[in-house]
Amino acid sequence: MAVSTDTPNSCDALVIGAGAAGLFYGARAGEAGLRVLVIDHAAKPAEKVRISGGGRCNFTNLHTAPENFISANRHFARSALARFTPTDFLAHLARHSITWHEKTLGQLFCDARSGAIIDMLLGDLRAAGGELRLNTSIRDIEKTNEGFRVVTSGGVVEAARLVIASGGLSIPKMGATGFAYDVARQFGHAVIAPRPALVPFVFEGRDKEDFASISGLACPVQARNDRAAFEEALLFTHRGLSGPAILQISSYWAEGEPVTLDLMAGLDAAAALMAFKAQHPKKSLATALESLLPARLVALLSARGDVPDMPRLADMSHGAIENLVSSLSRWTVKPSGTEGWRTAEVTAGGVDTSGLSSKTMESRLVPGLYFIGECVDVTGWLGGYNFQWAWASAYAAARA
Ligand SMILES: Cc1cc2nc3c(=O)[nH]c(=O)nc-3n(C[C@H](O)[C@H](O)[C@H](O)COP(=O)(O)OP(=O)(O)OC[C@H]3O[C@@H](n4cnc5c(N)ncnc54)[C@H](O)[C@@H]3O)c2cc1C
């Protein structure tokens, strides 16, 4: 496409990125009277909304609190989250007659497909007079006295405000780029090294073979390290470990570190095994453990030597049973890495919040420049928190 530089378009707010944050911002800013243009290089808007939550978009979490977010400044998200809450988002859904349900742990999902949320975002943008241009890439950004001059593949746009909502690096095949980080650096902002988060672990050698041998098996665990602990499901995969407990702890994991899995989480396992022993003293430890854990996992633990050769319960003292339970509560694994950007649900790190206003998301260095959504160094836990951050940060910027 030819670049026309002679007749610049102008608008009050130019938004780069038509994802959750960019579209939500566009509608709110339009409602406040700004002329908004949203640009995206992709052919379709909000593709991550479409695939999120298994196609039903886990759009928020009832228990949203600043503690559910990771950031170099753990207080940064507080203000925006307080000024746009899950209840506020539910009011938007109600106006569009979008019904929803709670699955677990405060996670709210659409009853219909996540396309309902995309339709709402696009409908709101249209109703507020905003324009959306897809298949349009950005070639250059320059600060001017009046605002910004942005050269796009569809011509030059002049805007008083420039809102960067182009997300993080996860899932490059869906169009993720480091664009926001490049813009941040261009204007003197620091970027906290982006890393894949909410991502499965991979293993090498014996661990990889072992976990692959029971791939598809799931069980409840507590996954923990020195910084966090999550009690949710673990899933064995062909490449290693996944499931909500692993995705959550992966956001707190650094290369080379071990992760501790409590396979007895939520169970009074020693009491259960002692009761089993009292009733069935001639049965084996394996049979007793199978009342607490999936049989294939018990067999694997035995084959790996992670539990002792399976004696008769009658031959195990109370102390031996307690030791066994204690070691299964501290089953330690050492991932060789993660599945990386290919499958990471989110990007941890990003535009350093020390350069941004926590009230408006505006740059402290360049007036009129805003960063919202996933590109900012605010990363939510699994369970609707990342969309809540997208809505709340967009709302904060639109109110500016
Ligand atoms: C598989 C999956 C499932 C998920 N499920 C959930 C869930 O259920 N609940 C939840 O809270 N979170 C979920 N997330 C995370 C959530 O999707 C993101 O945190 C959220 O979409 C971030 O919104 P955003 O608007 O900041 O960025 P994005 O949604 O990533 O939007 C960024 C937009 O910018 C565009 N863009 C990128 N680079 C450029 C460029 N150089 N030029 C122009 N445009 C550009 C992209 O095409 C994209 O449209 C999931 C993520 C994945 C990958």
Image: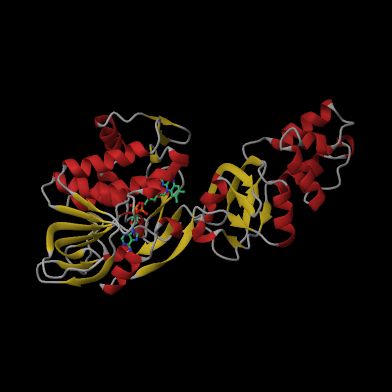
Q: Can residue 80 be seen in this view?
A: no
Where is 115 relative to 43, above or below?
above
Colouring convention used in this rendered image of the protein: secondary structure
Residue 286 screen position, x and y as percent: 82, 38
Residue 204 screen position, x and y as percent: 68, 62
Question: Image check: 287 left or right of 32?
Answer: right
Q: How many marks?
A: 0
Q: Residue at x 74, y 32 (%)?
A: 291
Where is 13 relative to 127, above or below?
below
Quarter of the rendering occupied by the N terminus: bottom left
Where is 272 relative to 67, above or below?
above
Q: Can residue 97 be seen in this view?
A: yes
Q: Nearer the viewer, residue 48 or 354?
A: 48
Question: Image check: 237 left or right of 117?
Answer: right
Q: Give the quadrant of residue 312.
A: top right
Q: Residue at x 47, y 32 (%)?
A: 103
Q: Nearer the viewer, residue 9 or 120?
A: 9
Residue 334 screen position, x and y as percent: 65, 60
| Residue at the outermost top position | 279
Q: Residue at x 27, y 37 (%)?
A: 88
Q: Residue at x 36, y 39 (%)?
A: 115
Residue 28 screen position, x and y as percent: 19, 45
